[in-house]
Each structure stands twice: as structure tokens, then as C-alpha cells.
Image: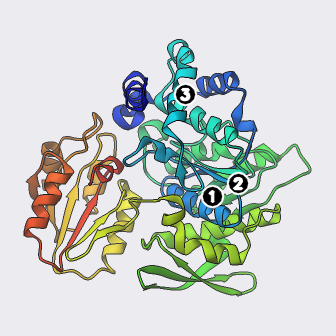
Amino acid sequence: MNYAETLDYLFTKLPMFSRLGAAAYKKDLTNTIQLCEALGNPQHQFKSIHIAGTNGKGSTSHMLAAILQTGGYKTGLYTSPHLKDFRERIKINGEMCSEAFVVRFTERIKPLIETLEPSFFEITVAMAFTWFAEQQVDIAVIEVGLGGRLDSTNIIQPELSIITNIGWDHMNMLGNSLPEIAAEKAGIIKKNVPLVIGEWLPETKPVFEKQYAFINNDTSIHPPFVFASEERWITDWQYHHQLLEITVASKKSDERHTYQLDLPGIYQLKNLLTVLAATHELGKKGWNCHEAIVQKALPHVKKKTGLHGRWEIIQQQPAVILDVGHNVDGIKAIRQQLEHCSYQHLHIIIGMVKDKDIDAVLALLPKHASYHFTQAQIPRALDAVSLQQQASVFGLTGHIYSDVNTALKEVLSKAATDDLILVCGSVFLVGEVG
């Protein structure tokens, strides 16, 4: 098979969560363990950082990867889903794995695919671990796909575990309360591995504390356990030459540092505190990610790692912005961001997938915007007609479009130069823009 044929085989042969939803979710690690054992357990051949969370884990992963690259390390980065190219999931120092490797790996693993019937995600995790081992990375930043405890990535023994936050998402698989969701994500906590929690709530903090104590209660070695928001705080922030300029103070010493970040979303303020706590813990373990390295890396995260879709401005006059926000916390962050934007009129192009809490998202969207309802070209997508009907209950009205690019072209033809056009609601919708 050539590369195109290989991708077609992977996309059509394997159950794919991004296309099918819960039906593709495998609720145990058996397949991943067997796949990796057959491959020589590549996950044990490199050091790693493991990152879970409802929101922010992608941005946090990319920021840490950029910092480690700047520190001189050959840095792997595994994230999901991809926006445009499948190989975006598997990168080393910002470069995607080769097409030849994807073909070679798939041919090698085909007999196991036939016998184990793994999911698409299980195969891509094994593929990423194999690439990182083959290329002898110094360290790999591994983003959890879904949850944590039963996620396919949860067979690594990392240098550091990070949980960015807990919010309402994937309740049909992770639980119907925040403590239940937190317990699933706390499943990445490992014995003798430092832990950083980005954000916590009164109902989730005890979950992390209990799991940490349970995992480490039979050892005299107690690794650091840090709540990032209790270590540092944001004293000031502003936009400066299209960069987010953030001043951070230590709560212990009141020492202050100012950082420039090329990810302009205001929600990155919380992610930055998580990243700074993480680099501090990594530094204590001997990794070269001291203050000067962090300062140097953060203005160039997108260039170093290829991160897209986080309040990404792809055009001016009128402004066209892409944001992958798709759940309650993600839309709340978008609302906050919009409050700091100047525009004559707001156009929102939106599409969602069926298994989200759609009403909760629609209830948060601004009433003053013009809406343009569409859908991603995947089976999980909620059809635009149904989305329009649900939105009307919340006073959100607008036209229907067959796909996001048709919608964007139509809106651009009518928008004023000082209008703002936002595309959001689904990672897959954002990925189809272009």
C-alpha cells in the first residue's frame, strides 16, 4: 500500500472515535498492552510526560514540547485529534513522522489488527511510541486522548504527570459528576512520579489527594504533588504586538517574571501557570528548562510545534478566527475572549458533534451574533438542521450550510471589514477550514 491507501485502510478498517464516538472507545488497556508487547514495548525506551484534562491539555502539551526543544532535547509530541494531516499526531521537534514510516508500521502491524481488532486510537498510540523509540527521542510529551485511567496512553511510566483541569465533557463515558470525571483522569497518577494539577474545584481536589495518597501510601518516597494555582498567580496581562504578555508572581517569594506567548487566547493564562509548575518540577529532576529557556520558548510555540486552532487568527479585515472550543468550559473561555475584542458585528460559524452537551453550549453563546449552522464531514457530526432547531430554543437564529467552507465563503462575501467571524464548536469543523 502507498500512503493514501494506508490512511484509507486505517480510517475505514479501525473503529475511530472521532468518526463514531463512544462505539469506538475501548474500555481497557488490553489491546494497547498486547500491541506494544509485540512491538518490543517501545514505551519503555524513552522518557515521557503525561498530560490529561478536560480542556487545555493540547496547549499545555505544545508549550512544554516547545520548552524542551528549546532546552536542547529531541522532543516527541503525541496529541489528538489531528486537524488536517494524520501525522500531526506524531511529531519530533515539530516535524511530523514520515509517510514511509506510517506505511511501514501499518504493514508490520496488519496481522495483529486482524486478530485483535483494535481501535484507531490504540493503533496510533502504538505507532507514536514506536516512532519515538526508533528515533531515540530524549523525551516525549504524551497527551491523553480521553479520560486517563483507561486511555491507551496510560501504559507509560512518565517523568511527570499533569492534569490541567476537570470539566463537563464525555459524560457518557467518564461519569455524570465532576468527582467521577476527576477519578477517571486521576487514573494517570503513578507511584513515585511528581504530579501537577492545573485547576481544581472543591469537589475535585479531594479526588486527586485521595488517589495520590493511595498510589504512594506504601513507599517512603513521596514525589512532589503541586496545585499550580497555589504556587503562582497572574498579576497582569495585555496584548503586545500580537503576543499575550503575562506577568506572573510566585506566591512564596513574590518574585515576578514576564512572559510573551504566541497563543493569544486569554484561557492560556491558566495553562501558563500549569506549564510553569511543570517546568519547575522537571528542573528539580535535572531537565534543562530553567527560566531563560522558558522565556525563549514561549513566544515561538506555534512555530516550534505547529499548534493551530487556539484562537487562531487566519485573516484580518474582516478578522477570521478559529477556535476548537467545543464544550461548556471551552465556550466560556471563548465568551471571555470576545469581551476583549473590538468589532462591529459578530458572525459565528458553528458545528457540533452529537455526543456533546449541546444545549449547555448553546445556552452560553452570545445572543447578539449572527449564526451560520453547518457540520463536519464525519458520522459523529450533528446535522446542521438539528443544530439550527436546537439553537432556536435559545434565541440563536441563522442559515444552514452544507460545510464550513461554504459557510465561510458566504459570510466573507457579506461581512464588513471591521466584523469578526468565529469558527467554533468542533475540532473537526475547524480542521476542515481551508
Callout in the foreground (3, 1): 3
* SS assignment at label 3: helix
Percent position (x, y) of residue 28?
58, 27
Query: Residue 397, image x and y in percent?
Result: 10, 59
Place residue 135 in its image quadrant: top right
Residue at 35% over, 31% down: 20
Residue at 51% in and 34% down: 100
For residue 217, above or below residue 23? below
Residue that protrudes farthest toward the top in the picture:
115
Whether residue 348 sits left or right of residue 10 in the image: it is left
> Distance of mark 2 from mark 3, alpha carbons?
44 Å
Kindly identify which numbered label has been placed on residue 131. Answer: none
The image position of residue 57, as x and y in percent, is 53, 56
Secondary structure, mark 1, is: helix
Amino acid type indicated by mark 2: Glu
Q: Looking at the rendering, in which quadrant would you find the C terminus?
A: bottom left
- Does residue 314 lie above or below 256 as drawn? above
Q: Which mark is residue 205?
A: 1
Q: Residue at x 66, y 87 (%)?
A: 256
What colour scheme was applied to this rendering of the protein?
rainbow
| Mark 3 crowd level (few <14, some 14–19, many ≥20, 10 Å Cα) | some
Q: Which mark is residue 209?
A: 2
Seen from the viewer's position, the closer of residues 338 and 88 is: 88
Task: Please report contact status of discs 3 and 1: CB closer than 8 Å, yes or no.
Answer: no
Name which quarter of the figure residue 16 lies in.
top left
Tag 1: Cα neighbours inside 10 Å, few (<14), some, or many (≥20)? some
Q: Are marks 2 and 1 in contact (CB under 8 Å)?
A: yes
Please state which of residues 279 and 383 is positioned toward the viewer in this rendering: 279
Q: Horizontally, is 87 left or right of 328 in the view?
A: right
Disc 3: which residue = 104
Question: Could you give the CA–CA distance between mark 2 and mark 1, rounded to whole angstroms?
Answer: 6 Å
Depicted 404 relative to depicted 28: above or below: below
